[in-house]
Image (cartoon, coloured by chain):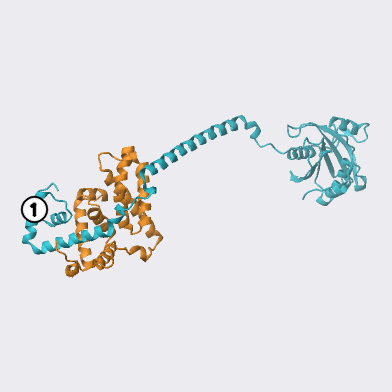
Amino acid sequence: MSRPFAIDTDALHAYADGQLSAAERGAVEQYLALHPEAASLVAQWQRQNDAFATLFSAPASEPVPTRLSPQRIALGVRHERQQSLRNLAAALILVILGGGIGWYGRDYLVPVEASSDVLIDQAVTAHTLYVKEKLHAVEVPADAPNLMRWLSNRISTPIDAPNLTAQGFTFIGGRLLPGYDDAAPGPAAQLMYENASAERLTLYITAPLPDKKEVWKFAARDGVEAYYWANDAVTCTIVSDLPEADVKMLGKKIFEQLTRRPDSNWNPVG
Amino acid sequence: MQQFLDEIESIVPALRRYARALTRNADRADDLVQDCLERAIRKQVLWQPTGSLKSWLFRILLNLYRNELRVARRRGEHVAVETLLVEPSVAPAQPGRIALAEMARAIDTLATDQREALLLVVLEGLSYSEAASVLGIPMGTLMSRLGRARAALRTATGSGEEPRLRTVK
């Protein structure tokens, strides 16, 4: 209390709380001797204070649990900091590694289009390009000698043109088409068929893919439908705009003859 | 660092006492103290060596206590009755017992800010200026809180007319 000492309520509180200097205490005591009401009030406060001490002092003399040891807590904090530094370092290393792998591995990480999709695209493109042709629909007509041997050689896979006469389709010829990219590098043979109502059907045939996995796919693109299969003998995409039931029926026959397997293995999806 | 920790260690008993008186629950009190110490040790750099370490620690403790109260209030948490009842640390046969229990209950009825202030001054023996700085209030506010707290206690315990509390000073 820096202001000049006056005996007011604050001073009485300060007296009860033992916050006065000896001289100030003396002054208050003199005052209290003359003012019994104030004295009784201050005495009450002091008894309150005593009660507080009795009620609440105990914890200060109890043994302190170890979890409240500052040394221990500091140790914990230090470990935690070291740990978070280590975590930070680890995170940094991961970021750097990740960046490096991402950068140098970018060629491997770019999603590669599935071979089947590439082949179906190619088959559909070739189909729509050539079925419109009246006179030059095929490169080599069906009756040319050695047509199938030539195509077989070029695609490195022995194939015969499936006979679809019973289904009303006549083989009109074929052509050799280039491969596309890494997903389907080898050349392809396109075989074209036609029925009495001038509806056309093409087969897009390549050597089996390196993984020789059996895959079945159906896709509708650009207004035509494509049935695709791949196995260890061949990949073939049947493209047409015929009704689905017809394509399924034709597909069985084609599958049977191309892969020389019973048509019970014909398993188009969709 | 070592000196800092040693100094803190010397204040821990007072912090426990104060926290226990505020919460009336030994576990909650020690949880508060532990939080307080962790915070202080983590933020050691924030401590101004010019201020008293004790005031700083009490300020942290009080803030944590208030946060806890706020959270509890928001959750609508009810404190079990038995945790509010204090076991007086005197033998039951002693005549002061009833008065003490009454006092303990009276303290519980005080407004939180009055209780915080009164306990800092009376229990912890902080000087008025220290207590005001811990509570972050002007001295005048502190004095009026003390005055109101003491008047409320007098009313609650009826000690004005209570002969058995009257002892020779």
Along the line of sight, which residue is nearer the eye, A188 or B81?
B81
Percent from the top left, x then y, of residue A77?
41, 41
Q: Is residue A162 visible?
A: yes
Q: Which quadrant is the C terminus of chain B positioned in?
A: bottom left
Along the line of sight, which residue is nearer the eye, A242 or A102?
A102
Q: Which quadrant is the N terminus of chain B positioned in?
A: top left
Percent from the top left, x then y, of residue B81?
36, 66
Percent from the top left, x then y, of residue A88?
48, 36
- Residue located beneath label 1 in the image: A26
Q: Quadrant of residue A71?
A: top left
Along the line of sight, which residue is nearer the eye, A49 or A137?
A49
Q: Residues within 10 Å of mark 1 (few under 14, many from 20)?
A: few
Q: Residue at x 6, y 56 (%)?
A: A30
Dot 1: chain letter: A
The answer to whether residue A200 is above or below residue A25 is above
Q: Looking at the colours in the rendered structure, which chain would you say is drawn in cyan?
A: A
Q: Chain B shown in which color? A: orange
